[in-house]
Amino acid sequence: MNLEQLQNTNIVILGAGLTGLSCARFLRDNGLAFVLNDSRENSVELDTLASFPNDKFIQGYWDSEVISSSDLIIASP
């Protein structure tokens, strides 16, 4: 699968630690939209989130609706 095939894909990244944020940067840099979801409250600094202005960030719980409606889940260890 190439990146062009992911253009209209609902992508969810689970976990906003180092690996999750690295995946988010990769997707952003390649023009792909995503939702970043972390179960922890305040898991990411606001200035870090500012670098993803076009993407949605959910923290404090796993959003089961977003997860179940995704086409591609990237699970951060």
Image: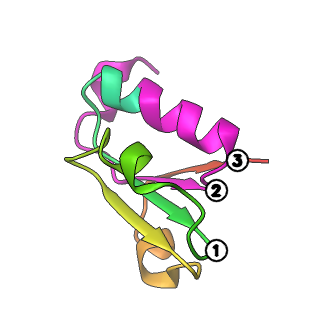
Give the numbered dot on residue 53. none
Residues in magenta, as a range: 1-26
- Residue 55 inside the magenta-drawn segment: no
Give the numbered dot on residue 15. 2
At 43% from the left and 44% from the top, the residue drawn is: 48
Residue type marked 3: Ser
Report helix, strand or loop for mark 1.
Answer: loop
Marks 2 and 1 in Cβ contact (< 8 Å) = no
Report helix, strand or loop for mark 2.
Answer: loop
Cα–Cα gap, marks 1 and 3: 12 Å
At 44% from the left and 30% from the top, the residue drawn is: 25
Q: Left or right: 67 with respect to 18?
A: left
Q: Residues within 10 Å of mark 2 (few under 14, many from 20)?
A: many
Q: Residues within 10 Å of mark 3 (few under 14, many from 20)?
A: some
Is tag 2's residue or tag 1's residue first in the polypeptide sequence? 2
Identify the image quadrant of residue 70. Answer: bottom left
Q: Is residue 31 above or below residue 45?
A: above
Q: Residues within 10 Å of mark 1 (few under 14, many from 20)?
A: some
Q: Is residue 60 above or below residue 46?
A: below
Q: Left or right: 38 with respect to 76?
A: left
Cα–Cα gap, marks 2 and 3: 5 Å
At 33% from the left and 21% from the top, the residue drawn is: 29
Q: Percent position (x, y) of residue 62?
A: 58, 78
Residue at image mark 3: 76
Residue type marked 1: Ser
In front of the other: 68 or 16: 16
Residue at image mark 1: 39
Q: Percent position (x, y) of residue 41?
A: 59, 76
Is tag 1's residue or tag 3's residue first in the polypeptide sequence? 1
Q: Left or right: 66 with respect to 52?
A: right
Q: Percent position (x, y) of residue 69?
A: 40, 71
